[in-house]
Amino acid sequence: MAKGLLTGTGLMLALLLLVFSAVGVGTASAQAAGLKKGFYKKSCPQAEDIARKVVWGRVAGNGELAAKFLRMFFHDCFVRGCDASVLLDSPTNTVEKNAPPNLSLAGFDVIDEVKAELERACPGVVSCADIVALAARDSVSFQYKRNLWEVETGRRDGTVSSDQEALNDIPAPTSTFDVLLSNFSSKGLGLQDLVVLS
């Protein structure tokens, strides 16, 4: 094994690959959900390149973004599936973004920047849900200057976002082992996933 592979970002990557093998968290399988590699190949062929360019540009100036995007992706997927519902705003502040577990999430400005660039190139084509997934991959991949895994795209954006669902679904830092195991089991995740993500 190469020196340093399981330290720092290498360890995070190893754990991440385990996580993304189960990223369907509470959703149908990738095939059933219509996810596939190169989903935007015809409708917006430069989509992944645009997202990568923006994310890499921002990660170059702030190395903490990789962890922040991974956390955002996990929190998004753990509530309603990977539907970008964590990005939604509400005048009443009753959305996932405003739930206590999500108040420390960061990187929304970068997601907005990626979305703006994609809208200029391909208006109305690329989902925010895919942007969050790509940002997680691209931010971790930055230091290696290549994609470390393929992201199946084709997610649909959610239109429902509830602070109460986020509060109920995202594991609390004070949860007992039994509560955590039950919480993960309800999402189709097991003991190994719990250990990796804890």
Image: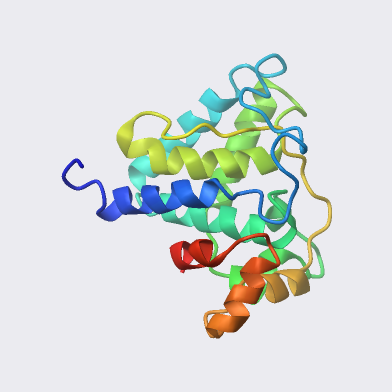
Q: Is residue 79 left or right of residue 63?
A: right
Give the residue displayed 37% in from the left and 53% down from the top. 12
Give the residue displayed 77% in from the left and 74% down from the top. 164
Q: Is residue 165 left or right of residue 9?
A: right
Q: Can you name the residue that lies furthest to the left here?
A: 3
Q: Is residue 122 left or right of residue 12?
A: right
Give the residue displayed 38% in from the left and 54% down from the top. 64
Q: Quadrant of residue 93?
A: bottom right
Q: Nearer the viewer, residue 136 or 197?
A: 197
Is 139 above or below relative to 193?
A: above
Q: Quadrant of residue 101?
A: bottom right
Residue 39 in percent (x, y) is at 68, 24
Residue 66 in percent (x, y) is at 42, 49
Marker count (numbered): 0
Give the residue displayed 64% in from the left and 28% down from the top. 118
Residue 143 in percent (x, y) is at 31, 38
Q: Nearer the viewer, residue 131 or 8?
A: 8
* Quadrant of the image containing the N terminus: top left
